[in-house]
Image: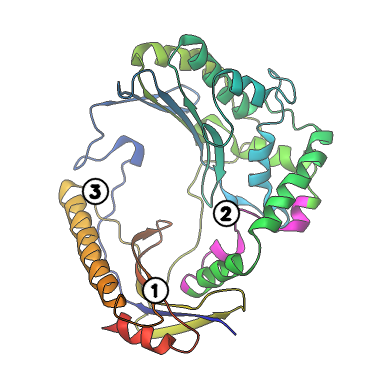
Amino acid sequence: MRQWLLLALLSVALPLQASEDPLWMGTADLPMSGRIHIGELANGMRYLLVSNKTPEQAVIVRMRVDVGSVVESDTEQGLVHFLEHMAFNGSTGLAAGEMIPTLQRLGLSFGADTNAVTEFQQTVYQFNLPSNSQDKVDTALFLMREIGSNLLLDPALIEREKAVVLAELRERSGADLENYRNQLQFLMPDTLLSKRLPVGEANSIKNATRETLLSLYQRFYTPSRTTLIVVGDIEVAVVEQKIKQQFAGWQAAPLAAKVKPQALGTVAERQRVEAAAFFDPSLSTSVSLGMLKPMAYPTDSPAVREQEILLELAHGILYRRMESQLLHSQGLSGVSLQVGEQFDLAYSTQMSLGTQENNWQEGIAILEQ
């Protein structure tokens, strides 16, 4: 049996004062860059605009909705991701099957220039426009507005899309996904992470109806949960006016959920060494050693950012030292180091090393050194 071994050394976080300022506005110690034009409509939708002339004419548009898989109930697992799929399956202003051709007429290819992603705590739609012409910017904003509240969620199209979503689930399922779920459960057992993977569960997807998807859509696709970002070769005042024209009339549905932080759970303080293993014959063998501590929330500042940069440099140095040592070792490969925040719950440092089935103990010794 091939094996994966994770060894976590968990330490205690020092309490630091948290900043209460909205992250998108910056803080007193680290204000938002003057290049970013910030606005908020009366309905609560926020937007951030940046004029950036390089490359010429290029414009990117992003729409972030504050909804991810952690808001799902047990019977809704995977439906936030399903909604993302339905965003490209027709709206009141765009007939079913017309979204992709419309984007292609803008010069956007699906995947490279047009895409969307559903994560634990957010859904993001993205268009990369090759031109800043007025009609292309207008169309991109119109399409984002349609996604915001005008989706048809046609029952026949839902049934057709089920096959696509289930195929994605099958493609992503397997030893790697279960290994990841196992790690989340081991490292953060008191959170929803291992129980709410964005890909969802087959039964919830198979049983999805227009009513269940519409309930999620109306509860969480609201102006106050939405941030629109436009960056590129633009005239900020012109784009701002276009946004107001498109989005000012958007009102939340009566059953809209109250905007509040999406509760993931907590990471407990632990001070002893703990270990876990995941076994599957299809996985190559690797070992990991790391530290995890509950997240502290320091007031953001240039000094905090400088410390983060120094820590990244230190990990880069450590990576090079390990990599050079592996060149002289038999059966060891694939060194990797990761450092940073995990879901705003914890701060982790982890070193991983590929080994053979019979020498993982040697890998642990190298990581410990």
Residue at 43% across / 68% down in the picture? 267
Q: Is residue 257 magenta?
A: no
Q: CA distance from mark 1 to mark 3?
A: 37 Å
Q: Indicate the amino acid at tag 2.
A: Val
- Give the x, y percent position of residue 120: 53, 52
Residue in the foreground of this view, choosing between 127 and 217: 127
Q: Secondary structure at mark 3?
A: loop
Judge whether 141 appears above or below 226 on screen. Answer: above
Q: Indicate the amino acid at tag 1.
A: Ser
Q: CA distance from mark 1 to mark 2?
A: 35 Å
**Boundaries of the magenta span:** 187-205
Judge whether 165 appears above or below 152 on screen. Answer: below
Which sits earlier in the primary sequence, circle 1 or circle 2?
2
Q: Which mark is residue 70?
A: 2
- Give the x, y percent position of residue 99: 66, 24
Which sits earlier in the primary sequence, circle 1 or circle 3?
3
- Residue 202 sits in quarter: bottom right
Residue at 75% across / 54% down in the picture? 204
* Label 3 Cα neighbours within 10 Å, binned few <14 / some 14-19 / many ≥20: some
Which sits earlier in the primary sequence, circle 2 or circle 3?
2
Task: Identify residue for label 1.
Answer: 333
Judge whether 259 appears above or below 305 on screen. Answer: above
Q: Check whether the beta carbons of the residues at disc 1 and disc 2 lie within 8 A of each other.
A: no
Q: Indicate the amino acid at tag 3.
A: Asp
Task: Identify residue for label 3.
Answer: 300
Residue at 82% across / 35% down in the picture? 155
- Give the x, y percent position of residue 113: 51, 31
